[in-house]
Structures are given as structure tokens and as C-alpha cells.
Amino acid sequence: MYTLHCTKKLLDRLNAEAATGTTVPTTALGNWYATVLFWRPQLALLVSERTLLPVLMPLAPAVTLASRFRGELSKALASHGLDTAFIDAEVAAMHETSIAKTANRSVVGMLNEFSFLATVYREDIGISEPLTLAAKLADTPCGPLKGNSPVRLLRELRKGSQ
């Protein structure tokens, strides 16, 4: 179980009613924050509250975003070299999703920063494949992580749970 905290723009696209409050996550990566990138095609940018790990995925069809996210997260975690046992446990713990408004301004700030960087990487460097773009973002040092990158924190989290 986890909460998917969505920006107003994304909530409008999902046609979802936001729940009040937040659930205590049963996942290692915690709750997730999400926004929409109005590119062609439109993408959803999701960021783990605990590690700031970014995941990019197609937005359409928007109403199935939460259910499709588990598969996209599985691909993203595998691309970072995590073992199948960790990935399977994380995806299994995400069996139930609650949709809510954003609540953590620091994570919303990272959503904005990653959105900007993704646009730069896409337009200036030519990276357009979502998985590759998300991997590039995951190597970005982040202020809320005391200069660590999300992928480094993800690997530390994985070592600590073994």
C-alpha cells in the first residue's frame, strides 16, 4: 500500500478524487509524487518520497496510470541493477494505491527540478526514451539528499534491507 501524491495538473488529467490524508506505506520506497509533462507524447514523472528516484512513463491512458506504474517501476529498478527479489517485494507491496494531493513541498520542488532537467536532456542532448531519461535524472545530486543522487540512496537502501 502506498499513496500517489499528484499535482493539480495530474489530478485533472486522471479525473480522480483526491483522498484526504496519506497512508503509511508498506513499500521500501515509500509514497510517490507525480506530475505530468506536456510533451508529445505526454509523460508522467513520478518520484519516490524516500529516495527521490524518478520514473518516467507514458501518461496515456491516464486513468490507468496507477495500475501501470508497478510495471514501469519494475523496469526502472531492474535498469539500476537491483535484484529480482527486491523488485518483486516492492511491486507486491504496491497492491493498493491511494490518490492524494501533494503534501511535501521538498518533493514537489524535486518534481519541478527533474521536470526542468528532463526537458534540457530531451531538447539539448536528445535523450527521449523515458527509461534512459529517468536513469540520467537518477544520477543527479539532490539537495534534500545532502548531495547524494537518488540511485546512490536506492542502492544504500537495498544494502540496508538485506
Image (spheres, helix red, strand yellow):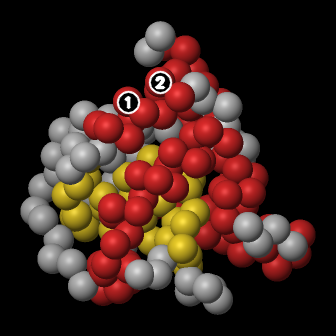
> Given contact means CB atoms under 8 Å apart, are the residues at marks 1 and 2 in contact?
yes
Q: Can you give x and y, in whole percent of width and height, for residue 86 in the image?
A: 47, 26
Secondary structure beneath label 2:
helix
Q: Can you give x and y, in whole percent of width and height, for residue 118 in the image?
A: 70, 68
The crowd level at tag 2 (other Cα within 10 Å; few <14, some 14-19, many 20+) is few
The crowd level at tag 1 (other Cα within 10 Å; few <14, some 14-19, many 20+) is few
Q: Can you give x and y, in whole percent of width and height, for residue 153 in the image?
A: 58, 30
Location of the N terminus by quadrant is top left
At 23% from the left and 55% from the top, the residue drawn is 97
Which residue is the extreme one toward the left?
20
Q: Which residue is mark 2?
A: 85
At 24% from the left and 39% from the top, the residue drawn is 25
What number is the disc on residue 89? 1
Front residue of 115 and 90: 90
| Inter-mark Cα distance, 1 to 2 | 6 Å
What number is the disc on residue 20? none
Front residue of 50 and 17: 17
Q: Is residue 83 visible?
A: yes
Q: Amino acid at mark 2?
A: Ala
